[in-house]
Amino acid sequence: MLAAVEQSSFALRYAHEHLRHDYGFILEVVQKNGWALRHAPIYFFADPKIVHTAVSQHAGVINYVTKELRSDRQFMQQIVGMHGSALSVASEKLQPDPDFVMDVMKQDSSAFQFAGKELRKNRLFVLRAIRACGGQVLEHADEKLKCDRDIVLAAVRRTGKSLAFASDELRDDPVIVQHAMQQDKEALRYASELLRQTMLAALSGA
């Protein structure tokens, strides 16, 4: 049966009833095919060890777990650490929690795109996140913050290529672009067309 489930998660539906309710068997199943949890008895969706094991195999399983686990700070921190997208199903209490979101971003900064809208608008939080996690945080910040010179400057100083996420106006700012290039010379490709040509001409004539 384990071999069959490894090939197709749907095979679990046809396992003998006593096996489908056997904790050890289900744990073995999700170790081989996390997606199979969908076909297990529903009470396994509330078991932290079973779910953690399943999610480590297949991120999509997180959509099937109980509200209680989605609200469990320690459990969700582990899960989001493995898959940043899992923040999208965290409880309404955790998604806007700045300390929780910062902790998981230090493991996977891409989780920021699934944080609460207010956090992505929060200037101080975004600045703190850039300093802690890198300039790539700018990609998922609120659009107004991509026009904020201090925010963008902080971002490109940490990650030059984050210039790509700045507003058109700031990608045409020589000071911003120079700081981005100091961190990563390839950042020049994200400058405005006019500024890029001007700087390339200056570099070639140097």
Image (spheres, rainbow, N blue to C red):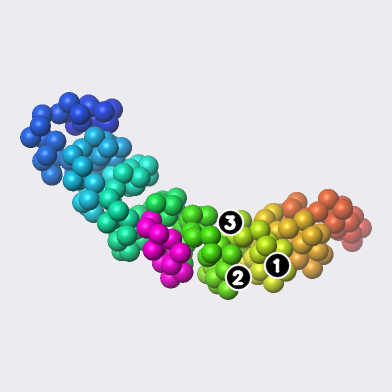
- Seen in the picture, residue 123 relative to 109 is either above or below; the reply is below
- Seen in the picture, residue 129 relative to 108 is either above or below; the reply is below
Figure quadrant of the N terminus: top left
Figure quadrant of the C terminus: bottom right
What amino acid is at disc 2? Arg
- Residue 80: x and y in percent read 39, 56
**Could you tell me which secondary element the residue under label 3 belongs to?**
helix
What amino acid is at disc 1? Asp
**Magenta span main SS:** loop
Residue behind mark 3:
140
- Residue 180: x and y in percent read 71, 63
Give the spatial CA distance, label 1 vs label 2: 9 Å
Who's the residue at 37% across and 42% down the image? 60
Question: For the magenta stretch, what is the residue range?
Answer: 90-101
Taking the image as shown, residue 21 lies to the left or right of residue 151, namely: left
Earlier in the chain: of badge 1 and badge 2, it is 2
Judged from this view, the residue extending furthest toward the left is: 18
What amino acid is at disc 3? His
Who's the residue at 18% across and 39% down the image? 41
- Seen in the picture, residue 2 relative to 195 is either above or below; the reply is above
Residue behind mark 1:
148
Who's the residue at 7% across and 35% down the image? 18
Dot 3 and dot 2 residues touching (CB under 8 Å): no
**Could you tell me which secondary element the residue under label 1 belongs to?**
loop
- Seen in the picture, residue 155 relative to 2 is either above or below; the reply is below
Taking the image as shown, residue 13 lies to the left or right of residue 148, namely: left
Residue behind mark 2:
123
**Could you tell me which secondary element the residue under label 2 belongs to?**
helix
